[in-house]
Amino acid sequence: MQIVITKHAKERYAERIMEKTDSRDINLFISQNEDKIRGDIEKMIQYGTLLYTGKTTCGKQGTNPVNVYQNDLWVVLEDSKTHDVITLYKIDLGLDDEFNKMFLNRMLEKLAQVNEEKDSIQQTVNVECETYRQMIKENEAAINLYRGYVKNLESLNLDYKNTIDDLQIKNAIADQNVRDVIAKLIGKKEF
């Protein structure tokens, strides 16, 4: 898989890792150190820990899911579809690296806990969804059975209506026979 280091990520590397402060120094560093930047960022990903893949709650809505990598106190965000490295930054709460590492460890413990809860919830939800899918399947089988009953009843009703029509024809023929006899009796006059 070939990753692409975006211009923004290169700028953040120059600014945050190499501590370049103005745009001229940042751009000069990037143009002179493309291979170093690529190599270092690739190593951050290769030797880092993939913490998360998915949409984030921050940033632009509707963007692709991201891979969030953590390497020591550094975080690298990569577009999970295109593998473009979006940005990188150091976890820095304004004190010292020891405090930052303590914070990171606590957050990683919290992440492990919520991932465990998520897995448990997903397992429960999957079991419940399968139960409802089975109920739907059984209901559909019953619906098909009842549809068969309804079709049979509709067919029987159609046969009964045809029989009624046939009987009405017999009645009409019998009525016509009576009129024919009466017509002969009264001399073929219509009445």
Image: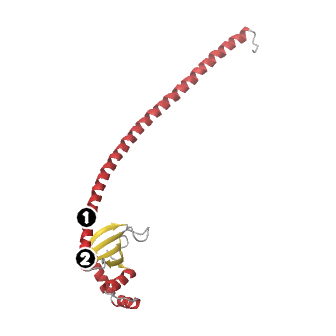
Amino acid type, residue under disc 1 in the picture: Ala
At mark 2, the secondary structure is helix
Q: Crowding near pointer 2: few (<14 within 10 Å), some, many (20+)?
A: few
Nearest the viewer among 118 and 83 is 118
Task: Estimate the x, y position of residue 62 in percent, counting from the top left.
Answer: 44, 67
> Taking 20 as reference, is 109 left or right?
left
Nearer the observer, 15 or 179: 15
Whether 8 is drawn above or below 164: the answer is below
* Residue 108 vertical placement versus 137 (above, below): below
Which label number is shown at residue 1?
none
Q: Residue at x 30, y 86 (%)?
A: 36
Which residue was labeled with disc 1?
112
Q: Residue at x 32, y 71 (%)?
A: 68
The reply, left or right, for residue 158 in relation to residue 91 is right
State how far apart marks 1 and 2 are (Cα). 20 Å
Q: Which residue is mark 2?
A: 99
According to the image, what is the colour scheme of the structure? secondary structure
Total count of labels: 2
Question: Can you say whether 75 is above or below 171 in the image?
Answer: below
- Which quadrant of the figure contains the C terminus? top right
- Quadrant of the rendered structure where residue 103 is? bottom left
